[in-house]
Each structure stands twice: as structure tokens, then as C-alpha cells.
Amino acid sequence: MKIQFAKMTRIITMLTLLAALAGCVPVSAPASTPGASVVTAPTAAAAETIELAMGYIPSVQFAPFYVAVEKGFYREEGLEVKFRYGFESDLIKLVGSNELQFMIGSGEEVILGRAQGLPVIYAMSWYRKFPVVVFAPKGSGLDSPAKLIGHKIGIPGLFGASYVGWKALVYATQLDESKVSLQSIGFTQAAAVQSQQVDAALDYSVNGPVQMRLAGQEVDEIFVADYVDLPSNGIITNDKTVAEQPELVRRFVRATLRGLEYTLVNPDGAFALSLQQVPEAGADETARKTNRAIFDEVLKLWQTEGVLGFSDPARWETAARFMQAMGLITTAVKPETLYTNQFVETR
């Protein structure tokens, strides 16, 4: 069945605008209050309840966490997990003050938080590849950073993961950004490229490029990660929880990693389990096709030949150095304070 571009765009905008990642970028406020939707894991006798915050709205992009609920991995660790949805820039402040103990967030948010005095720390790596890309229609010739010179590039705004990704690309390639017209277009990247409002746009690889392909148009992508390797989405907690409740963190990470392993080994099963948590993602043929395309694309960002959950110290050193050099933070942070591998090294 041929998908109408406008209809498909409305569906993806509703289901995948995250922060992305992704849960990972601040977005304009929706009509309803984030956090209203709460999904609870199966209860168990004497289970310890924890709240996990994540970006914006329920989405198949959170499959490993939904799998850990549906397969009972959290329950087996004596945990009852409640999901809370909101904006990453707000949630990280709550984690920093210990009003929340856990959230899914991006590496640059940890660096920004630490630079502002928030005692937040990254406890488990999830994404193995930074998801931001510059995308353009196939055959446009915009397939490398140098070729962006003289062109109009759309971006949601000068904030969030897309902006950090742009600055990282400039930093890594020494691109003269004064020769690029960077235009704030809100979260309309695919539509803006499709209508030739801009020549290319910055977005998550699971969002704009997927919309374009579902509309029947192939794209060229410039992955920021191919030029500079930055830490992306993972589990964030705080220093107090790590110091005073290390076994709680260990149990939560262990169950989550089981969910991630299952998802990578059995993607069809994981997608089906995710639909139990996000039924609207499979409400009809169009929704299911759209969300399966998103799911298949995001899987590529989680795959690794290394140890699942492990943070590479070099990535954090690079990110902290780059963000200070580009003026994204004004206070130096020690890379070793940004993450810990104590909950994944002995798995």
C-alpha cells in the first residue's frame, strides 16, 4: 500500500519526536503534559519500585526497556519499574537533585549537567553510535561535510543533540561554518528537505531519513559518528545513588542489559513485545509499517562487537574536550567523573 507522505509524517512526528532520541533533545512543549502516561512492570512480592524517566512519549525506540518489563527481567531482580515520560533537559535536573534516581539520557547532557554542578553520572551505555546525521536527497551530492559549503542546512534550533552534533562535525572536520547557512526550521526536517526549503537537514537517523524513505525517496547521510565518536543515550543516575545503593544500580543495569540482549538477538519478538507497551504503534497497517522501519533503523545504533553497556573512556575524553573547545560548556569537567563501568565490567 502506498503511504501518503503527509499522513506518514504526522504519524512519525507523533511517535518519534524525542529527544529523540531518542530522547535526547529538548523539544517544544506538547499540548498535553509529559509524564501523564505511566506503564508499570509486573508486580512481585516485596518488589522495590523505581521510576525510570525517558524522553517525551512512549516509542518503540525504547524496546529494550519494554522487553525487560514484558519478559520479567526487572521482576527477577526484585524491581517494579514505572516509566515516566518528559523532556530530557528537565529530567536531568531531577536526577541531579535525587528526586529521580534513573533516566535515559544522552552523553552531552551528562557533560552539560556536570559543568553546571549537577552530580549526574552515566551508569550504562546503550547506543553505540551517536545518532545525529545530516541528510539530503540521494544524488544531491551532499554526501560529505566539505560539500555542505554554500548550502542551506536545516536544524530544529541551536540546542539539543542536533546542535551538538553539528558543532562536533564542524570541530572534527574544521568546516568553515560561516560558509554554511544554518537555518532553524523546528522539527520539520523531512518536510523541509522534501519541499526544498533547505538543501539538507540535521536529524536523528531514525527520524527524517526514515520519513524520506517511507515516502519513496532515498537519501544520502553524513553520520557525525563517522568523524567524531561521542557518547550517546544510556542510563543516567547520580552520585548519591551510586555511593549509597550500588546494588540497586547493579540490579537495574543487569536486567536492562538482558532486555537489550534479547532485543538484539530476537528483534521480531522484541518489536512484538514493544507493541504491548505502545499499542498505538501497531494500531493499523501504516502505523505498524512506519514503526517497524523506525525500529529496524534504531537497532543499528545499538549493535556492538564489544561489551554491552560498557563506556569507552576515550569517547568521554573526546566529548568533554570538544564541548569546551566549542564553547558548549565554560567549565572544564573531568572525564572520569562523567561515567562509571563498575556495573557492567563483571557481567
Image (cartoon, helix red, strand yellow):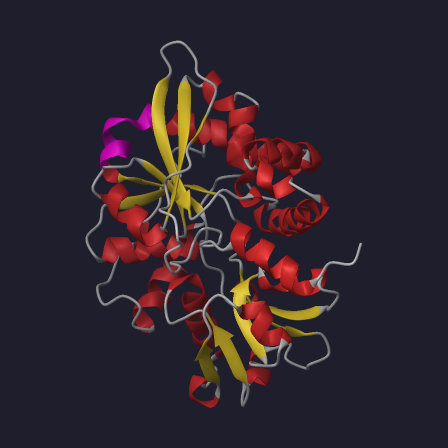
**Residue 184, quarter of the rendered image:** bottom left
Q: Is residue 140 depicted above or below 86 in this figure?
A: below
Q: Is residue 2 left or right of residue 223?
A: right
Horizontal placement of 264 versus 234: left or right? right
| Residue ID at (61%, 35%) | 275
Residue 267: x and y in percent read 67, 37
Residue 134 visible, this angle? no
Please tell me whether residue 300 is drawn above or below residue 218 in the rendered image.
Answer: above
Q: Residue at x 28, y 33 (%)?
A: 242
The span picked out in magenta is 240-248
Task: Place residue 122 in its image quadrant.
Answer: top left
- Give the residue displayed 44% in from the left and 19% down from the top: 77
Tell me the residue at 34%/73% (across/down): 326
In the rendered image, the quadrant that contains the N terminus is bottom right
Residue placed most toward the observer, 100 or 252: 100
Where does residue 64 sit, x and y in percent of width and height?
55, 36
Whether 288 is drawn above or below 159: the answer is: above
* Residue 280: x %, y % from top left: 59, 41
- Answer whether residue 179 is magenta in the image: no
